[in-house]
Image (cartoon, grey):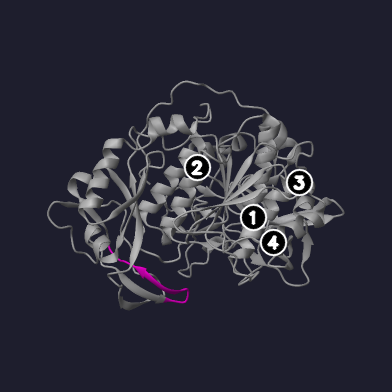
Amino acid sequence: MSGDQGPTAGRTVVAGSERAAPPGATDAGAADPTARTTVTIVLRPRSPMPSNPDPAQAPLSREEFAARYGASPDDARAVERFALDSGLLVIETSLARRSVLVEGTLADLGAAFEAELRLFESPAGRFCGRTGSLTVPAELGPLVLGVFGLDERPQARAQFRPAATDATSYSPPEVAAAYGFPTAVTGAGQTIALIELGGGFVQSDLDTFFSGLGIAAPTVTSVGVDGGSNSPAGDPNSADGEVMLDIEVAGSIAPGAAIVCYFGPNTDQGFLDAITTAVHDTTNKPGIISISWGGPESTWTAQALSNFDAAFAAAGMLGITVTVAAGDGGSSDGVTDGLAHVDFPASSPNVLACGGTQLTLKGAAISSETVWNDGSGGGATGGGISDVFPLPTWQASAKVPPSANAGAAAGRGVPDVSGDAAPSTGYAIVVDGSDIVVGGTSAVAPLWAALVALLNETAKITLGFINARLYADPASLRDITSGNNGAYAAGPGWDACTGLGSPNGPALATLLGTPPATSTATPAATPPSTT
């Protein structure tokens, strides 16, 4: 449904589905009506799902979660009937993920959801997209929480930055050792999921990297989502750099953990489906999910913000820790409107948002650590105050300031934690046969994911959503008090550059290395998040 045209009689707008025209793109005409693609329809949970995981509740199994909060079979059948009546194929229905994947021609899909599908030309290439809102039959309105897949604009960017040739570099284990990560464990028995939206890995590169460190290469497998696959481009500056950075940081710090890469297209549909596939994967059963992709909150639809956040809430209820890079564009997050912005999905209150520092070592010890900010054009850690998500209860005592934007409401502060991210003190990795040094908050998400894997093994549980425990004991982190990311400056306590600080391994092992007191009582039902 393009423009301001309202839904036809008997139909209702899918809440939050409105899309603006892609910025910087030009309309290249109508899309080929005979071309085929897929759409993911997200359904409501069968009973109201809590907006946030309760740290006092024991994690649910994936089977328990699906039975309690998955989609109802009746809702799924109603959507399947609508799809078939619209000339679409039902490819897959997952009650646990609350999704129905359908396929059809652009003509049939456009008619089914009242969307005018156009071609757009942008610096990123040509893609099919839409403007305005989507609709479904009125009787399906209460059932459908989102419709994804009718817009193929690139949704996220990888948060890594290649370093200059004269950069100081560290191996990931050197960084982990400086932070005092546990050394008596390897992450054995843990599985780390990496969400990837392009690129790929080559086993020979992994063999070279790990043999160079004298570490046995971890088991790395891939799962394709929505047509995505392990597809290395052969260019270290491509998304291959992101994939290899994630694997090599996580795998060298927690070499006993299995690593599973979930490859999806770089669209909101591909991103969401990769996340929900990892969360509800009953084969690989990841206990940690690391995400190094994102984009400014202002570039996402409301339905994407709410459905991604619900997926992260589900992860927390399953005992899964989600670590997310906070962005590399400083307090503006790369937006040129003169305002402060935070990166999503780091701004979800159900993830551990990971900011960046510049770490200098003298020998094996830390000699200084400040906010990563390389100035105009050089990159800086993301961070700030969400325009979408309110201040979480666990952040209430952190003295989160108002947004730098005049008149903004109090919101969720980003990041929560930090770690070495400056390209000038970057990570030495191997990509596409080349030895390179990279930085960016992309490295911090797998750094923290590996730390959680080590602590999971120590505690003999999956720690799950750890934010509340960290904020209750901020002395368990290294407070970073020097530097800024543009609109926000570091200082004692939490700040919108480095959060609570970088890892203090021994203190975190004491805090998180033993299971928290939990209850097995059924969690109270609360309305789903409407953010």
Q: Is residue 382 above or below residue 251?
A: below
Q: Is residue 291 above or below residue 461?
A: below
Q: Position of residue 340 (x, y in %)?
A: 49, 61
Specify the segment rendered in magenta.
Answer: 122-132
Q: Which residue is mark 4?
A: 422
In three-dimensional space, the C-alpha distance between marks 2 and 1, rounded to whole angstroms, equals 18 Å
Q: Nearer the viewer, mark 4 or mark 2?
A: 2
The residue drawn where x is 29% and y is 41% is 76
Question: 160 or 68: nearer the eye?
Answer: 68
In three-dimensional space, the C-alpha distance between marks 4 and 2, rounded to whole angstroms, equals 30 Å
Question: 364 or 189: nearer the eye?
Answer: 189
Please report whichever mark, 1 or 4, sits nearer to the chain's N-terminal start: 1
Secondary element under disc 2, as helix, strand or loop, is helix
Q: Which residue is mark 2?
A: 279
Q: Nearer the viewer, mark 2 or mark 3?
A: 2
Q: Is residue 156 left or right of residue 367?
A: left
